Image (spheres, rainbow, N blue to C red):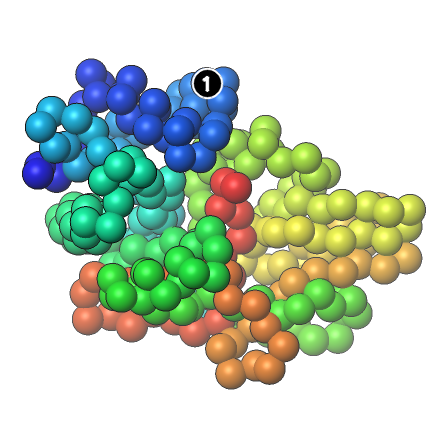
Amino acid sequence: MLYRLAEKEDMKAVCSLWKRVFGDSDEALKLFFTTFDSTENVLLCEIDGKVVSILTLLNAKIVSPDNEYNAYCVYAAATDENYRKNGIMSGLLSYACKIAKERNADFLFLKPANEKLFSYYRKNGFEDAFYRAERLEYNDKEKYNYSYVQWYENAISVDKVFSELNSYETKNGYLSFTAEGKIITVDHFVSGNIFALLDELKNDLHPEKIYVNLPCKADEIKKEATGMIKPLTDKKPPENIYLGITLE
């Protein structure tokens, strides 16, 4: 069993495993790897010359009102169905921690695809860290500081292509939304000042109502956990982090 970084000659096997597990098209994979040019960020496990498990590390930052932290998002983690329940992915996650630490990252973070996976990732050292409030009507009154994942422009570009939602972008950030008549629902956003971004959206499009899932703290009652984080150093993750897009 060998854990290593992928090389160009591995990408056919990587894409084959990716398609079998996630069902993505050749076109989607070509767009992803062309946009990110991320062969050096693909990690794999090889057994007897066969690629049996993969994951990708996406560059990002976690920005709080007081600081910025280098981080990687764990994306498209997959294991061949014939090799599951052997601890292979746990080993690959450990290898991802090693690589990320060598690259001076402070945290790994991810969005589990379902509730069951939250428990799995907790066993691998991740903790719940990203929460958002249930659907709220934006009323301009409550404005507060929060931490957020700052994605690089290539992540936003891919999200625009894959998203079936409308997008809106200004100097204050990026968001995707759906509209039903004069009612707008914000699906997700990438912004250090969502309140300024929502004000701009309101002034430009003049909706009757805007609904949004705002970032919130773990101790708030009506909340949804959307992601998990793993510290790689002695730094503690900031509270009240908003995850935003995850290239779903």
Residue 10 is left or right of residue 214, and the answer is: left
Give the class, few, some or many, for how many residues have Cα within 10 Å of label 1's Cα (few <14, many ≥20).
few
Helix, strand or loop at disc 1?
Answer: helix
Q: Position of residue 98 (x, y in %)?
A: 14, 51
Up/down of 220 relative to 111, above or below: below
Instruction: Tell me if residue 182 can be seen.
Output: yes
Q: Is residue 49 above or below residue 191?
A: above
Q: Establish if 212 lies above or below 127.
A: above
Q: Would residue 166 be found to the left or right of residue 121 on screen?
A: right
Residue 138 location, quadrant:
bottom right
Looking at the rendered structure, the kind of residue marked 1 is Asp
- Which residue appears at 33% of the width and 43% of the height? 77
Instruction: Say whether residue 73 is left or right of residue 167.
Output: left
115 and 160: which is toward the camera: 115
Q: Is 123 or 35 nearer to us in this picture?
A: 123
Q: Position of residue 198 (x, y in %)?
A: 72, 56
Q: Residue, x 37% and y 43% (percent of image)?
A: 75
Residue at the location (35% across, 56% down)?
109
How many marks the image carries: the answer is 1
Quadrant housing the N terminus: top left
Q: Give the image location of residue 5, x and y in percent.
A: 17, 33
Q: Where does the image place residue 48, in percent across and percent down from the top left?
A: 9, 28
- Above or below: residue 210 compared with residue 18: below
Task: Please say whether residue 148 is visible from this viewpoint.
Answer: no
Answer left or right for 186 relative to 95. Answer: right
Mark 1, residue position: 26
Rendered image quadrant of residue 68: bottom left
